[in-house]
Image (cartoon, grey):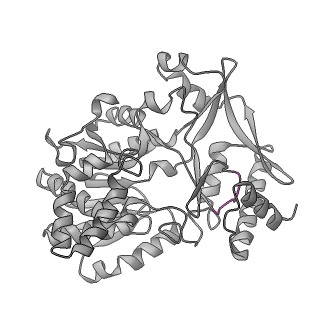
Amino acid sequence: MDYRARIFRELQQLGDLPPPTDEAIAHSEKLDHYLRHLATENGGTLFFDEFMEAVLYAPQLGYYEAGATKFGPAGDFVTAPEISSLFGACLAHQIIELFKAGATKQILEFGAGSGALAESVLAELALLDALPDRYLILERSADLSARQAQRLASWQAKGVKVEWLSRMPSHFNGLIVANEVLDAMAVKVWRYHNNTLEEQAVEPRDDGWQKVWHAPSTSLQQWFSALPEPLRSTLPDGYTSEANLQQDGWIRTLGAQLNTGAILVIDYGFPQHEYYHPQRPGTLMCHYRHHAHSEPTYLLGLQDITAHIDFTSLAKSASAVDLTVAGYIDQANFLTNCGLTNIMTRTAGNDLNQMARLAQQAKLLLLPSEMGELFKVMMLTKNLPQHSWLGFMHGDRRHRL
């Protein structure tokens, strides 16, 4: 089948979504060839996590490695920092409290996206005379690094040390921020069928890719066996979900490299008992031009692919490397605790039109039907004093993990 015709067939099946440019289609076809080569080298099939990793991160070809706009109205999805600088301003107030509690004045942001979060955090810290000694960004995408550097150039011109890293520094002291990082990690997709665990793989066909079920990899089998028995025993036949096995290694690495400081993880997700609820058959989603759907083998390299976070698993992995789970809360309560209303009032002053604009932005950040409930904030600390932290003063949910 002609590749262009295949893309338009996929768009039609998804609900007549807006077409990509000819250049984007040609790029997608190159990625398709690359994936087929990977599958051939692997005996004709790829486990889903291998497929997702390549679709998102293949050098020069993956979704996050190519040059198209991803974030904001012109992209495929909007993150909280893109919606409003209020998000970063609130986060800055939690950062200041951590600085005062003894954390070194360094910030390391994982996967800084468009640079919007760094920009708004630095703006609020500057306003409060609390700029960090260094703002570090660990970004695996060369394209996004270039976009971030352009956006943050004015801060560098003002003498703020903004630096890009290729790996996590050892013996780090300071604060680590990960906003919508874990949801972009490749996940394994599994099914519990006839009392047997199966793992999803994909195989190339003439007209696209086909999902198939295989015996599970050893790593997935070990993960599944470690789930609490009461949870496994309630899974209905045919139940399908995901497992983020990269998450454990990620947090263990951070825990080993962090000497003193805190890690702030902001993402959409649930405690384990809610994530693997019998009535929640998986969370895998794709995002293309602000349309969400569940076909990851479509529109290769042209759409984002994400899965929600199991925060219980994250907390257990963190505790195993001497990180303290200092707080776990929904985004709405976190932002409110960090002074959202006061920041809005200060920013708008007597300008009623400005206040109306900020109020509309705040609704998107706070409402349960938008980002307020689904997004959670987890703070992990190491070698910092026990404290009733600002962002978690009211509404802490650690008891639900």
Q: Residue at x 34, y 66 (%)?
A: 84
Residue 70: give x, y in percent of width and height. 53, 66
Residue 267: give x, y in percent of width and height. 40, 48
For the residue pair 354 and 222, the one nearer the viewer reads as 354
- Magenta range: 297-302
For the residue pair 89 and 319, the one nearer the viewer reads as 89
The image shows a total of numbered marks equal to 0
Q: Quadrant of the C terminus?
A: top left
Res 10 quadrant in image: bottom right
Residue 223 in view: yes
Q: Residue at x 65, y 61 (%)?
A: 301
Q: Is residue 283 left or right of residue 170?
A: right
Q: Residue at x 54, y 33 (%)?
A: 280
Q: Specify whether residue 292 is painted magenta.
A: no
Q: Is residue 223 left or right of residue 263?
A: right
Q: Is residue 346 left or right of residue 330?
A: left
Residue 253 to residue 90: above or below: above
For the residue pair 72 and 305, the one nearer the viewer reads as 72
Residue 390: give x, y in percent of width and height. 17, 48
For the residue pair 285 and 115, the one nearer the viewer reads as 285
Residue 94: give x, y in percent of width and height. 20, 54
Q: Quadrant of the N terminus?
A: bottom right
Residue 22 to residue 382: above or below: below
Residue 169 in view: no
Give the main secondary structure of the magenta stretch: loop
